[in-house]
Image (cartoon, helix red, strand yellow):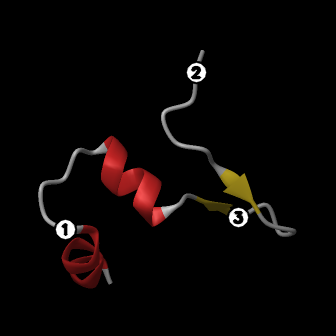
Amino acid sequence: MDELIRINHDENDNATVSGRELHAALEVETPYTMWFEHMH
């Protein structure tokens, strides 16, 4: 199965994804910089 978004794991096995890849995969219409501000 192809990945929609690459999942990265750090040395403690914490999973992270690229915010920009997530934004693109979700097809969010709001520009990334504005969308990201609302995510934290």
Label 1 environment density (alpha carbons within 10 Å; few <14, some 14–19, many ≥20): few
Instruction: Say which quadrant the N terminus sits in.
Output: top right
Rendered image quadrant of residue 32: bottom left
Instruction: Say which quadrant the C terminus sits in.
Output: bottom left
Residue lying at the far top in this picture: please name it: 1
Picture coordinates of residue 6, whole percent (x, y): 61, 44
Given residues 12 and 30, the one toward you in this image is 30
Upstream in the sequence, badge 1 or badge 2? Answer: 2
Secondary structure of the residue carrying numbered label 2? loop
Question: According to the image, label 2 marks what residue?
Answer: 2
The three-letter code of the residue at mark 1 reads Pro
Question: According to the image, label 3 marks what residue?
Answer: 14
Question: According to the image, label 1 marks what residue?
Answer: 31
Position of 26 relative to 30 (above/below): above
Q: Which mark is residue 18?
A: none
Residue shown at the point (22%, 45%) measured from the top left: 27
Rendered image quadrant of residue 17: bottom right
Between the C-alphas of marks 3 and 2, the distance is 21 Å
Upstream in the sequence, badge 3 or badge 2? Answer: 2
Residue lying at the far left in this picture: please name it: 29
Residue lying at the far right in this picture: please name it: 11
